Image (spheres, rainbow, N blue to C red):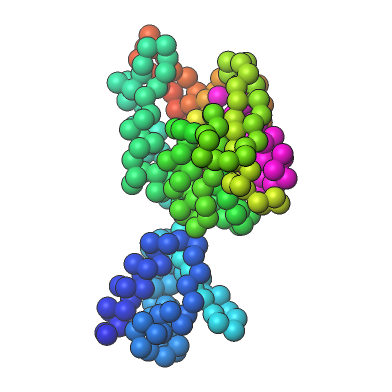
Amino acid sequence: MRRAHRIAAITKTLTERPHHVFAVGEFTDLFEVGRSTLSEDLAIIRATFEALHMGKVETISGAVGGVRYLPLLTREHILAHVEDICARLRDPQRILPGGFVYIDDLISSPALLRTVGSIFATEFGGHTPEYVVTVETAGIPVALQAAYALDIPLVVVRRQSRPTEGPVLTMNFVSGSARQIETMSLSRRALPQGSKVLLIDDFMKAGGTLRGLTDLMGEFECTVVGKGVLIETGWPGEKLIDDHLPLIYLHEVDVKEQKVVVRPADWIIS
C-alpha cells in the first residue's frame, strides 16, 4: 500500500475514535510495514494537524507503544464556533411565548454538537475523567458528544427509575429556578465507586440540577472533576454552583423588542 493510502486510513481510524490509544502493532500488522515506516507516516499526520490546528496526534512510548488523536481546539476555534451558535440564537424567530428560546434544533445537530463535545474534551481532558454524567433528556445529546470526544462511557441519570436498572439510588434535590423538590435516580451498577466523572448539561438557570448531580456523585463516592454547560442564563443572579464552565451566556430575552441578548462565556473571550 502506498504511503498516501496508509496516511488516509490511519487518519480516519484515529479521528473516528478520539482519545483511544491504538497499539502501534495494529497498524504495522495491518499495513505490513516496519515501525520506522509507520513513524514517518505518523509524523506527516502530526505535522499536518498541528499546522492546520486540527488537534494533536500523540505517540505514547512504552514496551508496546501506542498512538492517539486528541481533538484539542485552539481558543480562536472555540470562539468562532461559539460565536456561530450565538448568532443562531439571536434569531428573533426563536423567541417563544413566556420568554423561552427554542434550541431543540441546535442540541439535535450532530455536526454542531460534535464540535461542542471537542470543546469540552479540550477543556476537561487533562482531568482524565472516566465517565460523563448527565440527566435525561435534553442534556443527553450534548453529553454524548463529550463522551465520544473523550472516549469514555456516558451515564444517564433518570428522573424516574426503571425496573430494568436493578437496584437504584434515588435522591431529592431542589430545582434552582422553580425552587421545587425534584427527584433523580441512578442504577447502583452504573458507576464504580471512586470514579472520576465529568458532569455535562445543556441548559442552566440557577444550577439546581448540577448541584443535585454533584450531591448524587457524592453518594456514589465519585469525584467530580468538572462541570460543563452549553448555555447559562443571566437569571437568577444567585447560582447554586460557581465552579462550572459554560460556553454561552444568555443575558436576556426581550419579548417586546423581539431580541435575544447572548454572547460567548467570559473565559472564551478573555
Residue 140 higher or lower than 121, as above or below = above
Q: Is residue 232 left or right of residue 99?
A: right
Front residue of 102/73: it is: 102
Answer yes or no: is residue 145 visible.
yes
Q: Is residue 203 left or right of residue 199?
A: left
Q: Where 115 sits versus 212, above or below?
A: below
Residue at 58% of width from left, 41% of height from top? Answer: 166
Up-down: is 51 above or below 27?
above
Task: Quarter of the image for the N terminus: give it.
Answer: bottom left
Magenta-span inclusion, residue 156: no
The answer to which of 9 and 259 lies nearer the viewer is: 9
Identify the residue shown where x is 36% and y is 24%.
102
Of residues 237 and 172, the one drawn nearer to the viewer in this rendering: 172
**Which span of residues is magenta-colored?**
204-226
Q: Quadrant of the C terminus?
A: top right
Residue 132's x, y, as percent? 55, 47
- Say which residue appears at 55% left-offset and 32% top-offset: 161
Position of residue 95 in the picture relative to residue 148 (left or right): left
Query: Residue 11: x percent and y percent?
Result: 36, 69
Residue name at image x 69 percent, y 43 percent: 220
Residue 171 falls in which quadrant of the image?
A: top right
